[in-house]
Structure formats: structure tokens, C-alpha cells
């Protein structure tokens, strides 16, 4: 394949810009033409497509967000929307796509291939780390480091006042941000959607910690695991402990990407471009990922069917270390 388009879709994630830069420069080095598509699939439907060169991606490796902008596009889930997008690809002479996004973006790419035969290589870009086929998604490491920095700040003031704090983090239905930040940040209690919340047990643990002289507790709550306000009220009612709630929100989605995310961006980009470059029959319909520190690729259907993240061991270690 000689001509590719690149788009970012769904929630943005730190490292997307580093990945766009790597895709553009690596593909140009292979004498491919690269087109930037604005606002994800919406830009493909609307024809917001522009050829990129090495200078188009200057000075972005360190920036969060995405220079291509991003969107969640309902129209692309319709046959009519996909038809317009396929037409624009023909008009601009774009043979295949690099899609940086999460599971919704990949489902869109798969439908696009199934219905219109448009090949693509997906790169997992989401802070949530909610794709089971890959150990890590782009942006997750940076987001966890942002949460860790917040936990450090909160600990200073919580310890000074002997207070507890519920720190609510993002992740949709996945508890990885909470689990990794909780383990790395020494949280006393980690609440994730993959594990049933037991309020009695939480209150009991807080009381036990108090009896041991641990007067300040950090409780990290994944947004998909429960309601922070309700939990705060229950804890106050059942333990009498003074507790505050901090919702980190979109702060987790921005910021300069970590070293790990920048390296991952480059490694993902190289595999995605290679897949398209080698695709003589225009049949690529795959996502890239990382397993045991090796870059992998898999069909969208196989990758998206996987559900088990398998972090039981980390959860159990965190439970032992936090007491
Ligand atoms: O998927 C990324 C994410 O930040 C999730 O963690 C969160 O649930 C969601 O997006 C928030 O979406 P929005 O910015 O549309 O509120």
C-alpha cells in the first residue's frame, strides 16, 4: 500500500501526538503518502483530509491531546455514514487507515472493512487500558502517573489532618487505572469494578487501620466501581471517620506523555505502518498491541472478543501490602 490516512478517535490520550508523529515520519521514510484526517471518522465523512509531511508533526512529541482532534461519531455507525467516508477515501486516493483509539473506534474500523472493504491497522490509544488483548494501551502509563502525583499531594495534607480521602479515577468499566495507581501509590483500599464492593469490609478495614494507628487512609475508587458520595456517607455513618472525596476527572486525560508512552507510541506506529505497507491485497483488518513486551497484531474480531485482563495477582499483592 502506498497511501494511508491517519485519524484519532474516541477519548484522547497522552501519547497520541507522539504516535501520529511516528506514523507520519516512518511511513514517509517508506515513500508512502500520509493524509491526516481531522476529528476521527467525522472528518472522514466530512472530507477534512490533508496531506502531511515531516514538518506537519514537528514539536508535538511532548504534547498531550491530539493535533488531529478527536470525536465520537454516531454517523459512522450507519451505512450511509460509512458510504460517505469510503467515497472520500477514493476521492483523496487514500488506500488504508491507521486508527488510533479504543474499542468503539476499532468496532467502527471492523465494520468499515466488513461492509466497504477498507483496510486498516488499529493502535490502542485510551487511558482506560480496557482492551484485554494488549497488556497496555497508549496513554495509560501517563494517566496512572498523573493519578500518582495527585495521591502524593493528597497524602501530605490528609496525613497532616488525620483524614481519609476517596480518590475517584477514570477508566469506564475497567479498574486498571485504580489498581495500578493504588498499588504504586500505596492506597489503603482499592475499589475496582472487577471486584464486588463490600461496604461492611471497607468500614471494618478503616476501623482496624485506626486501631493500628493508621489514621489517614487513601481509598482509590474506579469510576465504574461505585458512587463516591454514597460511599463517603456510609463510611462517615458507620465509622465516624472524617473523610473527603476528590474526583480527578479529565486532568487524567491530559499532560505530557511519559517515556513509556512515547516509546510505546513509536513501537505501535512501526508495526501499524508495516502492516499497511506490506498489504498488497488491501486486506489488513488488524489491531496492534503489546504482550510480554513484544509487539503483536491480531484481527479486530479476535482481539475484541477477549475479556479477561488477568490482574488478579496484582490485586492480591496490593491487598497484602496496604495493611
Ligand atoms: O475513555 C476515556 C474516558 O476518559 C473514560 O475514562 C471516561 O469514562 C470517559 O472517557 C469520559 O468521557 P467524556 O470525556 O466524554 O466525559
Image (cartoon, rainbow, N blue to C red):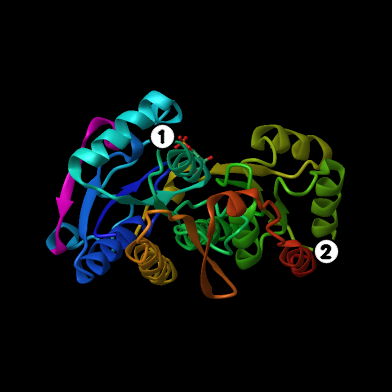
Q: Secondary structure at mark 1?
A: loop
Q: Secondary structure at mark 2?
A: loop
The structure residue drawn at horizontal position 87% and vertical position 43%, both measured from the top left corner, is 200
Residue under label 2: 212
Number of labels in the image equals: 2
Q: Residue furthest front?
A: 281
**Callout 2 crowding tier (Cα within 10 Å): few <14, some 14–19, many ≥20:** few
Q: Is mark 1 within 8 Å of ligand 1?
A: yes
Q: Quadrant of residue 215?
A: bottom right
Q: Residue furthest bottom?
A: 293
In this rendering, would 166 be left or right of 113?
right
Q: Position of residue 152 (x, y in %)?
A: 53, 62
In this rendering, would 158 be left or right of 314?
left
Point out the tag, 2 or 1, that comes first from the N-terminus.
1
In the image, which is nearer the foreground, mark 2 or mark 1?
1
Confirm whether residue 161 shows in the render: no
Q: Position of residue 153 (x, y in %)?
A: 50, 58
Q: Please provide the residue range marked out in magenta.
A: 43-54
Q: CA distance from mark 2 to mark 1?
A: 49 Å
Q: Is mark 2 within 8 Å of ligand 1?
A: no
The label shown at residue 147 is none
Confirm whether residue 147 shows in the render: yes
**Callout 1 crowding tier (Cα within 10 Å): few <14, some 14–19, many ≥20:** some
Residue under label 1: 72
Q: Position of residue 104 (x, y in %)?
A: 50, 40
Q: Nearer the viewer, residue 51 or 171?
A: 51
Q: Give the position of the N terminus as an image quadrant.
A: bottom left
| In the image, residue 226 above or below residue 98 | above
| In the image, residue 218 above or below residue 69 | below
Amino acid at each position: 500500500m502506498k497511501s494511508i490516512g491517519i485519524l484519532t478517535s474516541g477519548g484522547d490520550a497522552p501519547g497520541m501526538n507522539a504516535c501520529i508523529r511516528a506514523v507520519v515520519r516512518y511511513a514517509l521514510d517508506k515513500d508512502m503518502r500520509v493524509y491526516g484526517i481531522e476529528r476521527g471518522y467525522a472528518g472522514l465523512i466530512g472530507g477534512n483530509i490533508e496531506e502531511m509531511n515531516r514538518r506537519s508533526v514537528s514539536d508535538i512529541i511532548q504534547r498531550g491531546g491530539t493535533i488531529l482532534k478527536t470525536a465520537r461519531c454516531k454517523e459512522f455507525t450507519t451505512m450511509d455514514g460509512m458510504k460517505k467516508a469510503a467515497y472520500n477515501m477514493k476521492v483523496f486516493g487514500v488506500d488504508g487507515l491507521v486508527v488510533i483509539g479504543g474499542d468503539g473506534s476499532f468496532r467502527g474500523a471492523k465494520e468499515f472493512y466488513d461492509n466497504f472493504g477498507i483496510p486498516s491497522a488499529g493502535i490502542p490509544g485510551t487511558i482506560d487500558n480496557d482492551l484485554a488483548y494488549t497488556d497496555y494501551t497508549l496513554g495509560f502509563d501517563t494517566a496512572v502517573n498523573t493519578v500518582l502525583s495527585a495521591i502524593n499531594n493528597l497524602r501530605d495534607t490528609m496525613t497532616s489532618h488525620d483524614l481519609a480521602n476517596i480518590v475517584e479515577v477514570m477508566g469506564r468499566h475497567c479498574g486498571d487505572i485504580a489498581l495500578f495507581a493504588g498499588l504504586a501509590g500505596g492506597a489503603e483500599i482499592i475499589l475496582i469494578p472487577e471486584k464486588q464492593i463490600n461496604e461492611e469490609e471497607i468500614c471494618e478495614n478503616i476501623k482496624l487501620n485506626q486501631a493500628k494507628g493508621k489514621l489517614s487512609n487513601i481509598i482509590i475508587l474506579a469510576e465504574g466501581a461505585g458512587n463516591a458520595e454514597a460511599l463517603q456517607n456510609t463510611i462517615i455513618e458507620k465509622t465516624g471517620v472524617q473523610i473527603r472525596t476528590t474526583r480527578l476527572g479529565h486532568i487524567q486525560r491530559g499532560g505530557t506523555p511519559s517515556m513509556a508512552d512515547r516509546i510505546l507510541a513509536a513501537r505501535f506506529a512501526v508495526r501499524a505502518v508495516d502492516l499497511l505497507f506490506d498489504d498488497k491485497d488491501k486486506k489488513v483488518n488488524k489491531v496492534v498491541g503489546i504482550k510480554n513486551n513484544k509487539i503483536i497484531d491480531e484481527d479486530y474480531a479476535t482481539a475484541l472478543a477477549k475479556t479477561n485482563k488477568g490482574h488478579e495477582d496484582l490485586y492480591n499483592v496490593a491487598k497484602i501490602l496496604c495493611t
